[in-house]
Image (tube, helix red, strand yellow):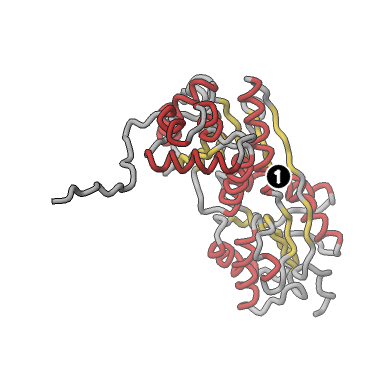
Amino acid sequence: MAERTPVKGPRRPRATASMADVARLAGVSSQTVSRVSNGYAGVNEETREQVLAAMKELGYRPNSAARALKRGEFRTIGVITFSLSSTGNVRTLEAIATSAAAEGYAVTLLPVALPTQDEVRGAFSRLEELAVDAVIVIMEVHLLDAATIMLPPYVQVLVVDSDAGEHYTVVDTDQAGGSRTAVEHLLGLGHDTVWHLGGPEDSFAAQRRTDAWRAALAEAGRTPPPLIRGDWSAESGYRAGLELAAQEDCTAVFAANDQMALGLLRALHERGRRVPEDVSVIGFDDIPEAGSFLPPLTTVHQDFAEVGRLCVEAVLRKVRQDDPERGTTLVPTRLVIRESTAPPPSPGR
């Protein structure tokens, strides 16, 4: 009986495959394997493909922990945030992830279920397990009580959307400047005063915008109307809009975000108050859909991409220089004028 020649199948992955094993199979040096696994430039594309194919065949995975110890960094940024329901937080997180990737860093998200000290402490304690080089916190500053939160050693921290510049490095949108521009635009159109649909009372951004609204009116010699609050949602804007529509002397409203402005527009329409003929409306954020509102919304543009870029740039500078810098960097805003604002109606109309 003829002896059967064994059929060669795919090489079985080795659970303990080493860099040397990959180098032998690919016919390259261990240094070349190291350069490929670390993503360094200067490796011939054909050689890179050989090494990657050998890694796949052997089931080799680079030891990220060992690489981190050798380099002294994990190339990972942790992001702690309370809410992903708000436009600002989501777009800031997206911009941070994009900027981090451009620098060769991964992002690990640590969501905080409830805005309590225990939840925040838990998020920070998990950082040691996740091995990050730095943390960007998108959260209200009153939750960062240094007396109760122990930061892992050597982890640099940056805070977004906060007034914590004395204790942390902070990057924020110029909330006050954007709000002032919105109010000044409406007063410049001839409105006697400007009503304000504010955000939640515990929000730093909302408070900054409310304070700037009051200050701009006071500087113009106008008495601020009663503040009406929402919770950032379009539904809360709608409820507030029903209340504002009943105010016959209300001819201009500055909403603290575009989503609430959307609900406000619906309420005014239902109550027969035309925008902008009877009531002018300005939002804040300049979400991608703002130009498709009916009418297209005049709003304050936030440069979320720049906020994210500056966050990553600043926190990596702290990592690389072990820099304990403090203070706040403000990213400018700009007013985008569309069709929801106009001069007030003539008397008697």
Q: Compared with residue 347, is residue 198 higher up or lower down, i.e. above or below? A: above
Please tell me how crowded label 1 is: few (under 14), some (14-19), or many (20+) other residues with Cα within 10 Å: some
State left or right for residue 238 relative to residue 281: left
Query: Can the viewer see residue 117?
Result: no
User: Is 316 in front, or is 42?
Assistant: 42
Residue 340 seen: yes
Q: Residue at x 64, y 77 (%)?
A: 269
Looking at the image, which is closer to me, 89 or 55? 55
Residue position marked by numbered label 1 in the rendering: 306
Q: Residue at x 81, y 74 (%)?
A: 345
Pick the front one: 196 or 86: 86
Q: Secondary structure at mark 1?
A: helix
Compared with 166, 217 (above or below) is: below
In which quadrant is the C terminus drawn? bottom right
Residue at the location (66% across, 62% down)? 288
Percent across and percent down for residue 69 are 48, 21
Q: Nearer the viewer, residue 246 or 180?
A: 180
Q: Indicate left or right for 277 with 18 as reference.
A: right
Up-down relation of residue 54 to residue 156 (above or below)? below
Amino acid type at circle 1 is Glu
Q: Report the side of 27 relative to 274 (left or right).
A: left
> Which residue is painted at 73% across and 70% down in the image?
279
